Amino acid sequence: MTNATRGPALLEQRGPRRPAAPPRKGSLPGGLLRTARPKQWVKNVLVLAAPAAAGELFSRHALVRLPLVFVLFTACAAAVYLVNDARDADADRAHPVKRHRPVAAGQVPVPVAYAVGAALAVLAPAAAAWLCSPAVAALLTAYLGLQLAYCVSLKHVLVVDLAVVTTGFLMRAVAGGLALGIPLSRWFLITTGFGALFMVSAKRYSEAVQMAGKAGATRALLTEYTTGYLRFVWQLAAGVAVLGYCLWALEEGGVPHTGLLPWRQLSMVAFVLAILRYAVFADRGTAGEPEDVVLHDRALALIGLVWAAMYGLAVADW
């Protein structure tokens, strides 16, 4: 038998070749960093909210304590992301985008993700108790417990899943106040809480719109929520957030106004415009990644800067 005739015969005996497994891209440390979601660390800037509202953002105590709280909250969030991605690795592989996550792609082994997540979950509250205060350590522990419960079961419960994620945002805002011993007003909590619910429900709405009719959705609840219901939630939350902020701005609290202009009242305009601008992306179904909307939309960034300037002048009563 010639080589020409023997080749096909050998191929038939060996059978078809299996496709080579895709190579793992990047190092393990790089994969762990990607799993920690650096783009979402912007959410932890909320620890500055309460000190900024109280006019203590640039005090010596705040300049030392707040960066520490930011890092500790980032570590806790990273622990939750690692555990979540390890649990959802199989489901993420069926998702057109999430299959590229390091754990789902095999860059970070599932046991390693669990181990690093557990280490961060233990070390962050311990460091908070030692370097910050027991109150902050207790808050971080509660945050970890709530978010891990979300990863395990609460994300499968209608409405509760929205409340848990919203509470995570609110805890970030409360942490800054606890770290500096700042009392938190009811208007601050209402505006922050419902503002967070607005962004969370807008994110869910956008995910539902984008995944409609497509297979591989990793959020089982997206098939149970209707887009009409999620639209109602983010519209309701936006309205309550605006109402809470306006009530704060119109409440003088018995302190006479001594500044050049009523900056607190004027800041309502910028706040409402910011909500309306973000609602444009929510209505289009493109608010699935809130950090991308906030960081990449120039108009929203400009409105945010104007609001921050007015808010700062109001706090300083300039």
Image: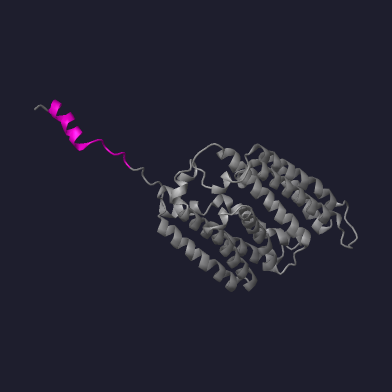
Instruction: Identify the image quadrant of the C terminus.
Output: bottom right
Residue at image point 52% right, 60% down = 79
Horizontally, is 291 left or right of 265 in the view? left
Q: Is residue 125 above or below residue 187?
A: below
The quarter of the picture where the N terminus appears is top left
Residue 159 x, y percent position in the rendering: 64, 53
Asked if residue 5 lies in the magenta stretch, the reply is: yes
How many callouts does the rendering have? 0
* Residue shown at the point (55%, 39%) measured from the top left: 211
The residue shown at (79%, 54%) is 244
Residue farthest toward the left in the current orientation of the protein: 1
Look at the magenta stretch and give its main secondary structure.
Answer: helix
Q: Name the spot of residue 227 as percent of width and height, x first.
A: 64, 41
Please say whether residue 58 is one of the residues in the magenta stretch: no
- The colour scheme applied to this rendered structure is one colour
Q: Nearer the viewer, residue 261 or 50?
A: 50
Magenta residues span 3-20
Can residue 100 be seen here? The reply is no
216 sits to left or right of 73: left
Taking 189 as reference, is 30 left or right?
Answer: left
Q: Position of residue 216 (x, y in %)?
A: 49, 42
Query: Does residue 150 show up?
Result: yes
Identified at 73% across, 59% down, the residue is: 189
Task: Give residue 140's position: percent from left, percent from top.
Answer: 60, 66
Q: Is residue 160 above or below residue 175?
A: above
On screen, 87 above or below 126?
above
